[in-house]
Every structure is written in structure tokens, then in C-alpha cells.
Image (cartoon, rainbow, N blue to C red):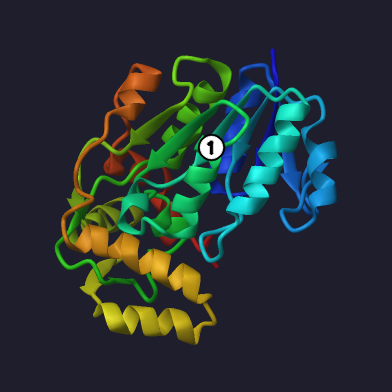
Amino acid sequence: MSTFLILGGTGKVGSRTVRQLRAGGHTARVASRTAGDVVFDWRDESTYEPAVRGIDGIFIVGPGSAKDWSASLTLLLQIASAAGVSKVVFLSARGVEFLPDGAVARAERALTAGAVPWVILRPTHFAQNFTEAMFVPVGGVIAAPVADGAEPFIDVEDIAQVAARLLTVDEWMNRTVEISGPAAITFAEAARVLSARSGANVSFVDEEPERHADRLRAAGTPEGYVEWRMAMLRGIRSGNDSYLSDGVQDVLGRPAGSFDEWAVREASALSDGSLG
């Protein structure tokens, strides 16, 4: 059994990946500035070496898409290589192609040029974004500038299982693995599924892109993230992100879970008060 460091281990994907690794008998150390098993802070280079000491592989969820952090990643990889780390799996996004000079694309380039063998994991938008992140309905309404664009939303549980597998086997070394759900659906269709499975009345409104960006800025969102998010949403709106990727089948030997299967399990959060 191996020991893995999970950067971003308290987040949606990282926490589920920790559970998968531990269920498989591995040691998974959650890295965090304050709430993990290991102290790690991207802004404090002195935390890098102690965090990677005794680690076989690292799962990296980056510090965000608002600012270029590729130099920090390059340094971390140098330190990790010297410490004997043999593999890094990086959580990217399939929509990275829509902003080729953005922070995530720069991080990918730093990874592939780095000193540690790597795997890039590129998922589509998460199904859980409707209950835990950017697409949570407000007053029962999902407002997003995507028109009738379709997206093959993926269950984060599938992402975590794929990530754990990529960390523990060598078959996909120095490769990019794209994963998606089994079917692309529109946001209007997603709203209907959420209504049916949660008991809440959920609808979708196509928001003007400029209004969406203005709302983000008014909330104090960093401009780099606004640029990244709008590029991702344009990918959906244009239909360019509707294609399917078979990485779940390739890595796990089974189909990806559907949006409806996820909603049966988790969409009750929309109506039981757990979203606050």
C-alpha cells in the first residue's frame, strides 16, 4: 500500500478521493493550511518539503483559476522529485482548451515540463455544481448564460474513483485522461430532473453573458476567475463542450453514472434545507 498527499483534500473532489484511497487500504494525507493532516500553503514555500516527505504520489487540486500559479507548481515538483515522489495526478478541466493561456492551461504546461511523472485528469462540469457550487438554484431558478447548450455533467464520485485509480496504477502515466457523464443534457433538462428528484420546483433561465459576468464582478470575484468561468460557459453555450469522453470506462471498466442517478442520490439537498 502507498502513501498519497491530497492537495485540496477538503474540497469536493479531494475529500472524496481521500475516502476512495483509504477504502482501498492506502494512506491519504489531507494537505491544508489549517484543517488537514499536513500543513501546506501554496503561498508559503517552506511548507512544500515537509508535506511531500515520505509521499509516493500527489493528487493536486490547484489553488484556483484566478491567478497564474505555475511557478509554484514547478517548484513543488522539483522538491517532490528530490523527495522521491513517483507520480502526480493533476485535476484540470476538459474546458481548458477554451482559455489556452489561462491559469489552468499554464499549470498543465508546468506539470508536463516538470520533474515528476504525471497524469492530467480533465472532467466536464460536475453534477454537484447544482447542489454545491456555481449552478445552485437561487429562489428555485438556475441562471446561467448557456442558452440551449448541452453538457455531459459528471458525478464527482466518478471523478474521485478515477483519480484514486490513476494514483495507484501506472497505466496512464504521462497521459491526459478526459472524463464525462454518459449523455449531454441542457440546463433546462437538468432543471426538470432536479425538480423530479428533489421535490423542489427548479427552473432554468438563460442569462445574458454580460449580466452574468457583471454579477460576478459585483460580488468581488477576481477578474482572472471571471475570465475562466466565462470561457467555460461559452464552451457550453456554443455546443463545443457537449461531446462525450470515455475515460471513466477506460479507467474503471464501467460506464460513468448518469445525471439522473446522481440526482436520485443527492438532489434532495435542494429541498431539505441542507443548502442553507
Residue 270's place in the image compared with 218, above or below, is above
Please state which of residues 181 and 119 is positioned toward the viewer in this rendering. Answer: 119
Tell me if I can see residue 136 in this picture.
no
In terms of image quadrants, where is residue 9?
top right
State which quarter of the image contains the N terminus: top right
* Residue 49 image point, x, y percent: 82, 38
In terms of image quadrants, where is residue 69?
bottom right
- What residue is rendered at 54% in x and 44% in y? 110
Please state which of residues 79 and 180 is positioned toward the viewer in this rendering. Answer: 79
Which class describes the residues within 10 Å of circle 1: few (<14), some (14-19), or many (20+)? Answer: few
Left or right relative to 52: residue 137: left
Instruction: Determine which residue is flagged by label 1.
Output: 113
Left or right relative to 256: residue 10: right
Please state which of residues 20 and 118 is positioned toward the viewer in this rendering. Answer: 118
* Residue 53 image point, x, y percent: 82, 30
Q: Secondary structure at mark 1?
A: loop
* Residue 196 image point, x, y percent: 26, 53
